[in-house]
Image (spheres, helix red, strand yellow):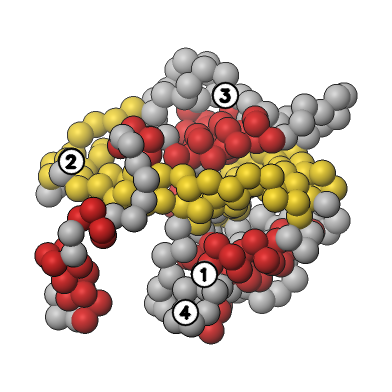
Amino acid sequence: MYENEFCARQYMEFHYTPSRTSYAQRLRTISESFDFPQRMAQKFKEFFPEAKNEQTRALEIGCATGASVLEMSKYFDSVIGVDYSETFIHFAQEVLRENSVPHVSRVSFGAVDQGDIEVARQVRLSHGLVPKRCQFFWGDAMNLFGEGGARANSVGKHTSRYDDVSWYHVPAGEQFDGVLVSNILCRLPDPRKLLDTLPRLLRKGGILVLASPYSWSDGVTPKNKWIGGLPDGPRSEDVVKEILMKNFELLNETDEAFLIRDHVRRYQLGFSHCTVWRRS
């Protein structure tokens, strides 16, 4: 685990760089990192104009287990969540199914406490969510329109091992009023391909919310497909904006903290570069 230079350099930073120098982010309190999925969806409340007598539709690409999609149901008449993980979608479907009756939920899971010790959790959706507006599907961010170029191990693999999970392609010509892409850009084999797809997905005036910590790894994304993050080249924040400005108007730019629990004594604290755009 520790016999590699990358890990050694991490510990050199940990041991010898003063923490005030090493910690480059601004965070006044850890609570600023709470409820990241909900905060991403709430960007639409601020920037998406209320539609008059029109049915509004939204899409989240990389929805994981679905909290942002459910939060977006406050602001859109229908919301589709798509993720490449069959298991994530299965869990999202369970949350949706068991919360169809307001204030009643039978969805529970075990959160890791220490080693094999778990603490019981129960899913309770907050007031104002509209689960009946939401749908979850298994799909590939690299092949949203079903036009080829999917990830190699997804080709011909459209029958899920779960009965409640089905494959999704965006129908030709279909567009959305809002699209959320949260923390998946650096988990794709070709992030530029997804960025180039986004203009097709949004109607004129539609809102895009894009967030990423740019945690590049050549085990996930080949280095020749990285957008930024290479010596003597531009930073990812600048490359993303340069690509999107061809078809979008930048409305807002922030750093958004997020917190993922590994166990009761260890958490992942990250900071996503978050931009909000209007389709021009």
Which residue in the protein does label 4 denote? 230
Find numbered disc 2 in the image and state the secondary structure of the residue it sits on: loop
Instruction: Give the label on residue 264, or none.
Output: 2
The residue located at (42%, 35%) in the rendering is 35
Callout in the foreground (2, 3): 2
Q: CA distance from mark 4 to mark 2?
A: 35 Å
Callout in the foreground (1, 3): 1
Of pointers 2 and 3, the one earlier in the residue sequence: 3
Q: CA distance from mark 4 to mark 3?
A: 42 Å
The residue located at (83%, 52%) in the rendering is 280
Residue 216: name its quadrant.
bottom left
Q: Nearer the viewer, residue 180 or 49?
A: 49
Q: CA distance from mark 4 to mark 1?
A: 8 Å
Of pointers 4 and 2, the one earlier in the residue sequence: 4
Which residue in the protein does label 1 denote? 235
Of pointers 4 and 3, the one earlier in the residue sequence: 3
Find numbered disc 4 in the image and state the secondary structure of the residue it sits on: loop
Which residue in the protein does label 3 denote? 129
Q: Nearer the viewer, residue 195 or 31?
A: 31
Find numbered disc 3 in the image and state the secondary structure of the residue it sits on: loop
